[in-house]
C-alpha cells in the first residue's frame, strides 16, 4: 500500500486551482443523461451580474451545494446547471457605473451593445468566483437570462398567457421608482423603518376647523377627499359636506368608510392621488378625481403652485414651513414607521398613473396557496413567509419595465388607432 503524505502546511493558492482543473478535466460535476439512474434536478436561481460575488451569494449557494453533493453520494444523477441573471436594472447599473454613462442619455441600441460587451467581459470573472469557492455546479451547462433561448422562451410564455386572457395592458396607478425611472412590482418592495413626523394640519369646513394627521404634507395639493369611520361620533355630522384644503383653496368631499382607523392620528384620513395603496383603493372605489402633483422624476408640477419644480422631500419641508407660517400646522409628533422602498436602490416608492402590462394573479391566490401545501419546506417557517406574501398581494403582477436592456415585450402598437399586434419578434 502506498503511503499518502500531506504537506506540512496547506497552500490554498496551489491546491485549489489544481483540484478545480482536475474536477473539470474528469467532468465530475457534469450531467450525463442516463435513463437507468434517478435524475435529481436543482432549479438554481441565477445570481445577478451586478458586480462581484458577496457573502450572501456564497452562503445561499453553499446550502444548495451541500444537498447536491449528498445526492451524488447516494448515487443520483445530479443535474445542477449554473446560470446568470444578466439583464435588466442591476446589469444596467453595473454598466453605467463601469463606463460612466447613463442609459437615459443614449440611444437604446447603443446602450444595449455596450451592455453585451460588458457582460462578455465580466461574466467569466463572475463565474470564476463560484468555481473558486468549490461549488460543484455543472459549468458546462450554463444559461443566461438575456440569451436568445431565454428571450424566445419568455416571449413564447407571454404569447401563451396573452391568448389565454391572463395578460392585459392598463393605465392605472403603479408603484414607481423616481430614481431608477421604472415601474416596480410588489415583489420588488422592501420595507424599512424610517423616522418621520405625524403633522396635525388644519383643514376647514363651514368655518369649523378639521385636523388631519399626515406624514406626507407634500401631498396636500393632491388631496381629493377626507374620510372618517361611519361609527366615529366625532365626525358623523360631516356626512355630505366639503372641506377646504389649506392655502391651495379648493374643496374636497368628506366621506365615510369602514376601513378608516379611528385610533390612527385624528381619525380623519386625507386621501391623495397617490400617497399610498390606501389612496389608490379609495380612488378606485369612490371614483374620485385625479390630482397628480409630481412627475416621473419626482419633482412637483404646476398643481403644487409655488412649490413647482421642487423634489418631493424638498417640497415636504417647504410646505411644512408654509403651514407653520400660515398657522395651519397645529403640532408635530416624531414617529418611526415602515416605508416601502425599491429593493435595488432603496429609494422610497411613489405611485404614478402609467400604462403598463400585467399578468392576472389575484384570482389565483387560493391556487398559489394550495400549491404551497404540496411542497416540502426546509425550514418550515419559509412556508409561513410565502403564505403571508401571497395573502397580502394587492395588485396583479406588473411585468413591464421602462428599461433599455431587457427582454422586449412582443407587442407592436399602432400610434394612430392604439391597436396591438402581438407576435414573436
Image (spheres, grey):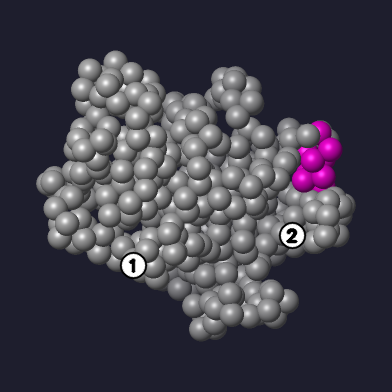
Residue 258 left/right relative to 31: left
Residue 298: image quadrant is: bottom left
Closer-to-camera residue (293/66): 293
- Mark 1 and mark 2 in contact? Answer it, CB < 8 Å: no
Residue at 21%, 61% (x, y): give it. Answer: 322
Closer-to-camera residue (400/223): 223
> Residue 286, percent across and down?
50, 31
Residue 214 left/right relative to 6: left
Residue 421 left/right relative to 404: right
Residue with the mark numbered 2: 408
> Residue 248, percent across and down?
33, 54
Closest to the camera, between mark 1 and mark 2, is 1
- Specify start and end residues of the magenta stretch as a single range: 156-164
Residue at 82%, 45% (x, y): give it. Answer: 159
> Residue 52, percent across and down?
48, 68
The first of marks 1 and 2 along the sequence is 1
What numbered label is drawn on residue 424? none
Q: Is residue 162 magenta?
A: yes
Distance in Å between CA atoms under marks 1 and 2? 41 Å
Closer-to-camera residue (409/277): 277
Amino acid at each position: 500500500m502506498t503511503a499518502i503524505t500531506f504537506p506540512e502546511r496547506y497552500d490554498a493558492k496551489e491546491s485549489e486551482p489544481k483540484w478545480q482543473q482536475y474536477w473539470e478535466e474528469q467532468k465530475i460535476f457534469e450531467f450525463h443523461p442516463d435513463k437507468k439512474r434517478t435524475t435529481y434536478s436543482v432549479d438554481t436561481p441565477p445570481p445577478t451580474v451586478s458586480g462581484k460575488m458577496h457573502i450572501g451569494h456564497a452562503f445561499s449557494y453553499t446550502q444548495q451545494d451541500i444537498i447536491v453533493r449528498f445526492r451524488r453520494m447516494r448515487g443520483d444523477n445530479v443535474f445542477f446547471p449554473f446560470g446568470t441573471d444578466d439583464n435588466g436594472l442591476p446589469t444596467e447599473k453595473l454598466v453605467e457605473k463601469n463606463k460612466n454613462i447613463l442609459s437615459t442619455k443614449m440611444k437604446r441600441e447603443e446602450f444595449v451593445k455596450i451592455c453585451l460587451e460588458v457582460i462578455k467581459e465580466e461574466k467569466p470573472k463572475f463565474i470564476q468566483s463560484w468555481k473558486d469557492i468549490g461549488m460543484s455546479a455543472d459549468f458546462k451547462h450554463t444559461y443566461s437570462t438575456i440569451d436568445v433561448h431565454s428571450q424566445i422562451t419568455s416571449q413564447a410564455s407571454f404569447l401563451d398567457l396573452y391568448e389565454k386572457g391572463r395578460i392585459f395592458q392598463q393605465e392605472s396607478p403603479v408603484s414607481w421608482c423616481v430614481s431608477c425611472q421604472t415601474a416596480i412590482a410588489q415583489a420588488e418592495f422592501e420595507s424599512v423603518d424610517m423616522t418621520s413626523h405625524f403633522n396635525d394640519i388644519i383643514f376647514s369646513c363651514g368655518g369649523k376647523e378639521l385636523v388631519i394627521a399626515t406624514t406626507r404634507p407634500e401631498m396636500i395639493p393632491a388631496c381629493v377627499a377626507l374620510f372618517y369611520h361611519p361609527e366615529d361620533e366625532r365626525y358623523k355630522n360631516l356626512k355630505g359636506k366639503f372641506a377646504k384644503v389649506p392655502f391651495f383653496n379648493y374643496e374636497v368631499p368628506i366621506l365615510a368608510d369602514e376601513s378608516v382607523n379611528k385610533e390612527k392620528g385624528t381619525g380623519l384620513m386625507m386621501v391623495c392621488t397617490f400617497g399610498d395603496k390606501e389612496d389608490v383603493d379609495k380612488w378606485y372605489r369612490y371614483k374620485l378625481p385625479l390630482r397628480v402633483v409630481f412627475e416621473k422624476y419626482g419633482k412637483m408640477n404646476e398643481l403644487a403652485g409655488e412649490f413647482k419644480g421642487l423634489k418631493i422631500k424638498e417640497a415636504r419641508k417647504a410646505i411644512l414651513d408654509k403651514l407653520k407660517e400660515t398657522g395651519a400646522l397645529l403640532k408635530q409628533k416624531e414617529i418611526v414607521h415602515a416605508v416601502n422602498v425599491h429593493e435595488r436602490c432603496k429609494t422610497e416608492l411613489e405611485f404614478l398613473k402609467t400604462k403598463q402590462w400585467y399578468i392576472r394573479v389575484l384570482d389565483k391566490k387560493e391556487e398559489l396557496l394550495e400549491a404551497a401545501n404540496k411542497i416540502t419546506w426546509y425550514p418550515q417557517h419559509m412556508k409561513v413567509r410565502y403564505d403571508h406574501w401571497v395573502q397580502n398581494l394587492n395588485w396583479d403582477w406588473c411585468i413591464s419595465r421602462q428599461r433599455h436592456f431587457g427582454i422586449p415585450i412582443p407587442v407592436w402598437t399602432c400610434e394612430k388607432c392604439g391597436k396591438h399586434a402581438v407576435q414573436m419578434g
